[in-house]
Amino acid sequence: MSDFDLKTATQEYATRLGDDSVVLGHRLSEWTSNAPFLEEDIALSNVALDYIGRARMYYSYAAELAGNGKTEDDLAYTRDMREFRNLLIHELPRGDFAYTMVRQLFVDVFNTYYLPELAKSSDSTLAGIAQKGIKETRYHLRRSHEWALRLGDGTEESHKRMQRAIESLWGYTHELFDADPLEVQLADAGVGVHNAALRPAWLEQVSEILTEASLTVPKDDWAVRGGRIGYHTENLGHMLNDMQFLHRAYPGCQW
Amino acid sequence: MVKSIPVIPFAWYERTQRRKQSAYTQIWEILDQVKDPEIPVLSIWDLGVLCDVQHIDGKYVVSITPTYSGCPAMETIRADIAAALEAAKIQPYEILTRLSPAWTTDWLSPQGREQLQAYGIAPPAGGGCAQAQGLTPDAGIECPHCGSSNTRRISEFGSTACKALFQCQDCHEPFDYFKHL
């Protein structure tokens, strides 16, 4: 415990949460002008914006704690893949529409339980960011829930795609409930959240929704981990190439 | 027909008290000129984005709060506040962003609600029991054009994060609904 410095740990935690938000926000933004129809295009772009807004708040806070003159933009645009600490589920390519909605459902239900806990944080900035996210998440979840029902219980094709997405994403959901020593210490200190405790409620709600949508809850027989220590799937590098290109090619550019 | 009696949301009452009790009436009035760039009929006061005006350590401190986490209008609002203060020679000043308590549509002023309506955007329905969670209803939001309640939701998300899209079944016009948050 002696090497545990609350401020440094909080800075690292805020960066991780910023990484989660910016990576998922970017993945969602890839649907802009590519969604199946206009309303859905706008909806996905709106959700993307909520995540990117959250990323900005987490990163700004991390930069403020670091106090080394770096900004939110430095954190988002000048770090390499191995420096990103996002959970892997957020970086997976957007896939088809079913895949995007299943991931959203898993993440939205997670945030439904995670954000109210973070809102109790003794760190007032993290609590404030979480508080804003709670209300937004209600809208996100209602939409991903409705899509799960419509597609799961829709045509043979939509059902097949939903089930395939669930099977391929399930092994990435376990990481949502992991915690390394830093996160455990932060949770013990009243700043962070004990994620593992959220899984029963998450599993119950996700199972309920999937069952209602005539979909099957997979077995827990595989899990991929590594995001929080910087071990990523090959997808993140490609994504960052795209996301960081402009900023790196034209440092400090303004328009 | 029973006439409904609107009750002022407590959050709105608190805001008006803060403004009334403030010693910086002139600054509040200057800031009334600053409008939301996406809904230019609404001032930042009417929208609830303007939280407080204080005088701390020799500086005028203007606190604002974002509506949604990703609200892209915040940058423009900051720049517009700075321009309004400078034009009025209010110096030195600082513009702070506050995240907590989180913005809520209860902070919209009654005048702001009327302005939204007149602009063609249906104001948020109050927090009645029909919307225990404050989510957007599927139907029944009053059409700002013809007043009919025979309307349906087309999309949960509209042209900006704070709006949903509806269509009136009577006059057939689509319209934005300012979501309850």
Image: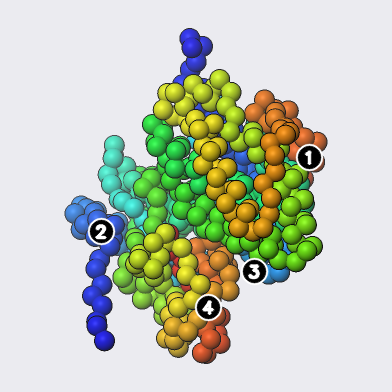
Distance in Å between CA atoms under marks 2 and 1: 48 Å
Q: Nearer the viewer, mark 4 or mark 2?
A: 4
Q: Secondary structure at mark 1?
A: helix
Instruction: Identify the subunit bearing mark 3.
Output: A
Instruction: Identify the subunit bearing mark 2.
Output: B
Say whether marks 4 and 2 touch (CB < 8 Å): no
Residue annotated with mark 3: A39
Q: Decide: is B162 above or below A9.
A: below
Say left or right for A149 vs A117: right
Residue annotated with mark 1: A235
Q: Quadrant of the N terminus of chain B?
A: bottom left
Q: Secondary structure at mark 3?
A: helix
Pinpoint residue B16: horizontal percent, then vertical percent.
24, 60
**Badge number at residue B150:** none
Q: Decide: is B92 above or below A231.
A: below
Q: Residues within 10 Å of mark 2 (few under 14, many from 20)?
A: few
**Badge number at residue B10:** 2
Pinpoint residue B27: horizontal percent, then vertical percent.
30, 56
Say left or right for B125 vs A231: left
Amino acid type, mark 3: Glu
Q: Earlier in the sequence, mark 4 or mark 2?
A: 2
Q: Nearer the viewer, mark 3 or mark 4?
A: 4
**Badge number at residue B152:** 4
Amino acid type, mark 2: Phe
Q: Decide: is A187 above or below B8.
A: above
Amino acid type, mark 4: Arg
Pinpoint residue A142: horizontal percent, then vertical percent.
54, 59
Distance in Å between CA atoms under marks 3 and 1: 28 Å
| Front one among A214 and A37 | A214
Q: Residues within 10 Å of mark 1 (few under 14, many from 20)?
A: few
Asked if badges 3 and 4 are on one and the same chain, I answer no
Distance in Å between CA atoms under marks 3 and 4: 14 Å
